[in-house]
Amino acid sequence: MSSEKWTLASFALTFLILSLVFVGNVDGALKKGKTCNKGWECSGSIFCCNQTISDLFQVYNFEELFAKRNAPVAQAVGFWDYHSFITASTVFQPLGFGTTGGKLMQMKEIAAFLGHVGSKTSCGYNVATGGPYAWGLCYNHEMSPSQSYCDPNYLYPCTPGVDYYGRGAIPVYWNFNYGIIGDGLKVDLLNRPDLLEQNATLAFQAAMWQWMNPKKKKQPSPHDVFVGNWKPTKNDTMAKRVPGFGTTMNILYGDLVCGQGDIDAMNNIISHYLYYLDLMGIGREAAGPHDILSCAEQVAFNPSTSSTS
Ligand SMILES: *[C@@H]1O[C@H](CO)[C@@H](O)[C@H](O)[C@H]1NC(C)=O
Ligand SMILES: *[C@@H]1O[C@H](CO)[C@@H](O)[C@H](O)[C@H]1NC(C)=O
Ligand SMILES: *[C@@H]1O[C@H](CO)[C@@H](O)[C@H](O)[C@H]1NC(C)=O
């Protein structure tokens, strides 16, 4: 149906060289100040003093957002669940994921992150029952990959016989990306990329890792641009990159989605985010104006040199 979505994120070849020196850090970033312990979900960080994700986003919210994920036509029936999402987030909530800035910002960040997830894993289409946005978490891996996504790489050489097609909640493509994210999560994804289609907690963690880390040093993470941790430079302003949801797409997908005008690939991600804001009772108005939501006119942080789709 919509397997082209699964090829969109495969542009990352250009990040190859510089990303070799960058290994994301999931445990060093606890800020100074009062730390709190919210038990297993969030502990030892100032961010845990605020409400945690499960205070604001409960099982019924998850079921509403991903209402069709266990429909008979879904590919990943029985795979994704709320518990995996919350368990995955215990690594990232102490770093500010879904715990930054107070209730409204926290709920918006959850909706934004899940907007990416929903769009990238959807098997919805315009006349689908329940509407096109009710079908997030339908897939957990790319259907009919056109190649094995193996690129020669010293640090992260491909394991013979293993394919690096798109897997996970924000699909990971290519050996080097599996290698980098595996290092970040301390799981050997280079040898076992299949773990992302066998373990939903890990599949969510790989997505959260991408949300919480930049693609290259000195660039912001999607989390940073979304919650307001990032101040655009003069270059960013000239490239029309502004804090907000639009720039999260720029970081994650570059010019496959951004700087191409009002294309479907971009609008589909935005629409999932807005749909989730509505379902979570915040309302899509809270997302702000279109120029913050969109990346239609933005120049990619990391332009791709070759088209991979
Ligand atoms: C906690 O929430 C308050 C608002 O309720 C916000 O001002 C503050 O920045 C939040 N703390 C952190 C660490 O984000
Ligand atoms: C799934 O992954 C999580 C996170 O790495 C890990 O804690 C858990 O043990 C894994 N579950 C299984 C069944 O391997
Ligand atoms: C700004 O853009 C120019 C021209 O593309 C580039 O040479 C320069 O390194 C950039 N500066 C920063 C801080 O990224």
Image: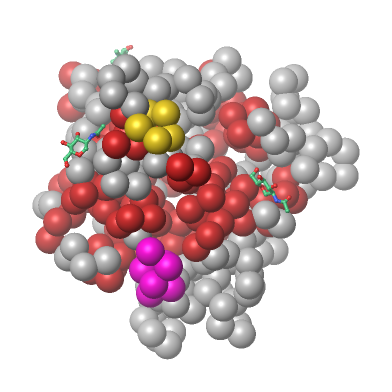
Q: Which segment did they paint magenta?
A: 58-65
Q: Nearer the viewer, residue 83 or 110?
A: 83
- The residue shown at (48%, 53%) is 86
Instruction: Find residue 61 and report its image quarter.
Output: bottom left
Q: Nearer the viewer, residue 298 or 110?
A: 110
Query: Residue 232, image x and y in percent?
Result: 21, 25
Residue 280 is inside the magenta segment: no
Visible residue check, residue 161: yes
Query: Residue 114, image x and y in percent?
Result: 40, 56
Query: Residue 48, image x and y in percent?
Result: 34, 37
Please identify the residue farthest to the right as the structure is shown: 160
- The residue shown at (59%, 29%) is 184
**In this rendering, would 192 be left or right of 31?**
right
The N terminus sits in image quarter: bottom right
Q: Nearer the viewer, residue 141 or 38?
A: 38
Where 8 sits versus 159, above or below? below
- The residue shown at (79%, 38%) is 191
**In this rendering, would 259 be left or right of 181?**
left
- The residue shown at (53%, 50%) is 87
**In this rendering, would 130 be left or right of 25?**
left
Where 199 sits versus 307, above or below? below
Visible residue check, residue 245: no
Query: Residue 60, image x and y in percent?
Result: 39, 72
Q: In which quadrant of this rendering is ligand 3 seen?
A: top left
